Amino acid sequence: MAAIKTVGVIGSGQMGNGIAHVAALAGFNVVLYDVSADRLKSAMATINGNLTRQVAKKTITEDAHKKALTRITSSDSLDGLAACDLVIETAVEKEEIKRKIFHDLCAVLKPEAIIASNTSSISITRLAATTDRPEKFIGIHFMNPVPVMELAELIRGIATDDATFDAAREFVTAMGKQIAVSEDFPAFIVNRILLPMINEAIYTLYEGVGNVEAIDAAMKL
C-alpha cells in the first residue's frame, strides 16, 4: 500500500479542525470537508488561532505555522476528497448519519483509499459494512482537543486488513500520537473506562461523600 500523503477530514467542528491542524503540522496535505462554507471559514480561523497560540508558547515555529496553513484546503463538496489517500470522518455520533456519509464517499474515492471513522463507540465492523471496502476501513479515535491530547485509539473491524492497520498506525505515529489498540467492542477502551468513572463521581456527590469542589480536585490531582 502506498504511503499516505493526502488526508481528507469530514466535518470541520472541534474534532475535525483539530485533526486537520495536527495532520498539516505533521507534513500531510489536508482537505477539510463540510457542507457549510461558513463552518469551513470558521474552522480555518480556529486552526490559525490555535497555531498562533503554539507559536506564542514556542511549541512550534512561525515557519511551521505558515507551512501548516498552506497544506490545508477546504471543500464543501465530497468531490474535493477524490484524491485523498485516507479520509477520516468526524461527523455527529449517530450511526445512520455516518453510514450515509460513507455510502456517498465511496462513490468519489479512488479504489485504494483508506476510510477511517473517529467514532468513540460505534462498531467499526458495522460502519465498514456500509462501504465498498471493509478491508480498508478502520477506527481512528482521537481525543479532544486533538492538538493537545497525546492518545489515539486504533480499532480494527472484523475485515480490516494488515496493510490498512499498518498504514493507519504509521499515520497516527507521524502525528506524534501514542497508540492504544482496541478490539471492536462497544465504547472501545477509553469511553468504557471513562463513563463508569464519571457515573461514580455523580454517585459520590449524590451520597454526600464529598462536594463538587472536593470530587473535582480529587480527580484532577
Image (tube, rainbow, N blue to C red):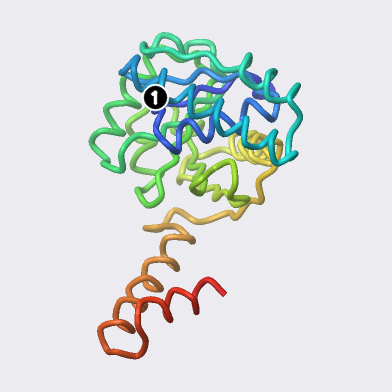
Q: Name the residue under label 1.
A: 132
Q: Quadrant of residue 26?
A: top right
In the foreground, 200 or 82: 200
Query: Please, is residue 18 above or below residue 29 in the view?
Result: below
Please state the horizontal and vertical placement of residue 209, each as a whole percent of the image. 35, 90
Query: Please, is residue 3 above or below residue 140 in the view?
Result: above
Locate residue 96 relative to residue 174 in the image: left or right.
left
Point 48% across, 61% down: residue: 189
Locate residue 93 relative to residue 154 in the image: left or right.
left
Q: In which quarter of the image is the C terminus?
A: bottom right
Point 58% across, 54% down: residue: 181
Q: Quadrant of the N terminus?
A: top right
Q: Quadrant of residue 127?
A: top left
Please state the horizontal and vertical placement of residue 108, each as a whole percent of the image. 41, 12
Please state the horizontal and vertical placement of residue 202, each as a whole percent of the image. 30, 76
> Dot 1: what SS?
loop
Crowdedness near tag 1: few (<14), some (14–19) or many (≥20) residues, C-alpha within 10 Å:
some
Q: Which amino acid does label 1 sit on?
A: Asp
Number of callouts in the render? Answer: 1
Point 35% across, 22% down: residue: 39
Query: Please, is residue 35 above or below residue 183 in the view?
Result: above
Please state the horizontal and vertical placement of residue 21, each as a whole percent of the image. 57, 30
